[in-house]
Image (tube, rainbow, N blue to C red):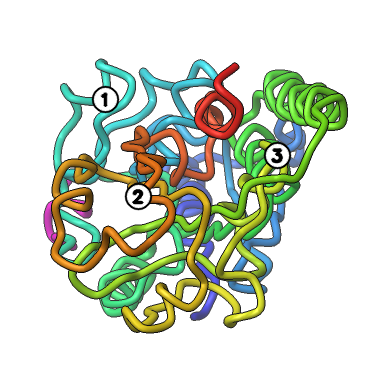
Amino acid sequence: MMRKAGLLMLVLLLVVTAGCGRRVEQPAPPAAGPYPMVVQDDAGRQVEIAAEPQRIVSLLPSLTETLFALGLGERVVGVTNFCNYPAEAEGKERVGGLRDLNAEKILALEPDVVLSGQMKGAQEVLQTLETAGVTVVVFDPATMEDIGRVIRSVGKLAGVVEKGEELAGGIAAGKQEMTARVGAVAGEKPRVFMLLDTENIWTVGDGEYMSEMIAAAGGVNAASGQGEGWLQLSEEKLFELDPDVIIATFPMREQLLARPGWQALQAVRNGRVYDADGDLVSRPGPRVLLGLEELHRVFYGQ
């Protein structure tokens, strides 16, 4: 995608238009503050932010949570249908789901910047927005460290650098504290299978923040070594892995316990199948520490 500087061009055009008919004796002084600035996004692009954004559209629940956690809720003018936290986000204009984003509705909101992930099926919409002169910044954190980096980047581009540093620093400190707690627990770590979908057995492999969260909370990802990213495994492979614990990212514990043939899995046989809050354990955002706490309680009952 080509980076755009539409807003900067518009500002320059307005300045020139306003000055018609008048002789300018001295050049205008440079604008105060860090703008325009350039940020590098996770699509590998250098994106120019012309001025402090006052109208922001968020296309990921984790980014919406980040904006509100940074105190930028009043600047958020549009979110997706899945942005359900905090409660204030429910009152924002909806621009569609993750796969059916409405470009016209986004453009009608006249955003200064759109924050997005690298979502399959959304590339055409993002291209439409950029062609129309909208600044789009893509974030795609793959690790817990990346979560802090994205928070800092959002804070920087929105002009709240200190808040971004504070929030990201708190997450790093919380993870360090959890590492100390896990280190004090004796015995073998449970082998954990994160189940994202019952029908097709989707899970998380190596190189993703959810796998890192399992480790940080004191478990071992049972699907480690099966591949990187999000994986679809066969039922036979699940039985071969035979995890100690199964974590369901949406309520399906009772369904799994009653599923024909699954009683042969030790996690099912021992009743170690748990429903986790999917928003906490699957969103790479400011509530990631709550996700760690939830996983740790499941693994160790504390």
In this view, 137 is above or below 224:
above
Q: Where is residue 23 shown, x and y percent of the image?
A: 60, 41
Query: Toward the viewer: 236 or 92?
Result: 236
User: In the displayed structure, does residue 38 sit left or right of residue 123?
Assistant: right
Distance between the Cα atoms at labels 3 and 1? 33 Å
Element on which disc 1 rests: helix
Q: Are marks 3 and 1 in contact (CB under 8 Å)?
A: no
Query: Toward the viewer: 207 or 302?
Result: 302
Element on which disc 3 rests: loop
Residue position for label 2: 269
Asked if residue 109 can be seen in this view, the reply is: no
- Which quarter of the image is occupied by the C terminus? top right
User: In the displayed structure, does residue 148 sit left or right of residue 57?
Assistant: right
Q: Where is residue 171 shown, x and y percent of the image?
A: 71, 27
Q: Where is residue 124 shown, x and y percent of the image?
A: 28, 79
Q: Which numbered dot is residue 218?
A: 3
For the record, the magenta segment spans: 102-108
Element on which disc 2 rests: helix
* Identity of the residue drawn at 19% across and 28% down: 92
Q: Which numbered dot is residue 20?
A: none
* Identity of the residue drawn at 43% across and 30% down: 65
Name which of mark 3 and mark 1 comes first in the sequence. 1
Kind of residue at badge 3: Gly
Residue position for label 1: 89
